[in-house]
Amino acid sequence: MDKIILKGIRFHGHHGVPEAERHVGGHYEIDATLGCPLANPGKTDALADTVDYAEVVTRIVEIGTQQSFQLIEALAEKIATVILEQFAVNEVHLIVKKLHPPIEQPIDYFAVEIFRNA
């Protein structure tokens, strides 16, 4: 399967279990891999024949910044569902990272990784 790879999509979102965390918000980073055939757009060189990855990024950021979830699992599931419904892709692989989560121990991020098929 051919793939479009989007790495390091960042935004400030309002997700988390404690209400205070959702109120203040935090920083998130998403890596998305979209499985879709790329032979035809490789031949035609036409945006109309492929997935507009700028539009995918826009949708991911909209979901991450305009909606609120307690769990990053739910955020990941919503993003995967929207991508599969709105774009011509056969599969989605997402890594959703909550950067510098508010816990006592220093940690770079918490993450979930999901794979979904059309």
Image (tube, rainbow, N blue to C red):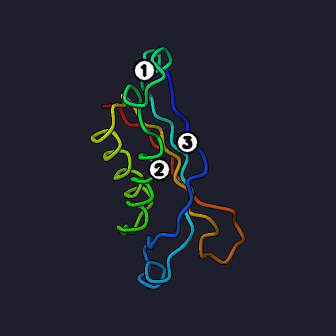
Q: Position of residue 6 (x, y in %)?
A: 55, 42
Q: From the viewer's perspective, is residue 23 above or below residue 80?
A: below
Crowd class of label 3 (few under 14; some 14 to 19; many from 20; radius 10 Å): some
Residue identifier under label 1: 37
> Residue at horizontal 55%, vertical 36%?
5
Q: Amino acid type of disc 3? A: Leu
> Residue at horizontal 54%, vertical 73%?
26
Q: From the viewer's perspective, is residue 111 above or below residue 66?
A: above
Crowd class of label 1 (few under 14; some 14 to 19; many from 20; radius 10 Å): some
Q: Amino acid type of disc 2? A: Val
Of 105 and 13, nearer the camera is: 13
Crowd class of label 2 (few under 14; some 14 to 19; many from 20; radius 10 Å): some
Residue 6, label in figure? 3
Q: From the viewer's perspective, is residue 34 above or below residue 77?
A: above
The Cα–Cα distance between marks 3 and 2, rounded to whole angstroms, is 8 Å
Of 34 and 115, nearer the camera is: 34
Pointer 3 and pointer 2: residues touching (CB < 8 Å)?
yes
> Residue at horizontal 62%, vertical 75%?
103
Q: Position of residue 58 (x, y in %)?
A: 43, 54
The Cα–Cα distance between marks 3 and 1, rounded to whole angstroms, is 16 Å
Q: Could you say whether the residue bearing mark 2 is in a helix, strand or loop? A: helix
Of 32 and 73, nearer the camera is: 32
Considering every residue shown, the one lying at the far right of the view is: 106
Residue identifier under label 2: 57
Q: Amino acid type of disc 1? A: Pro
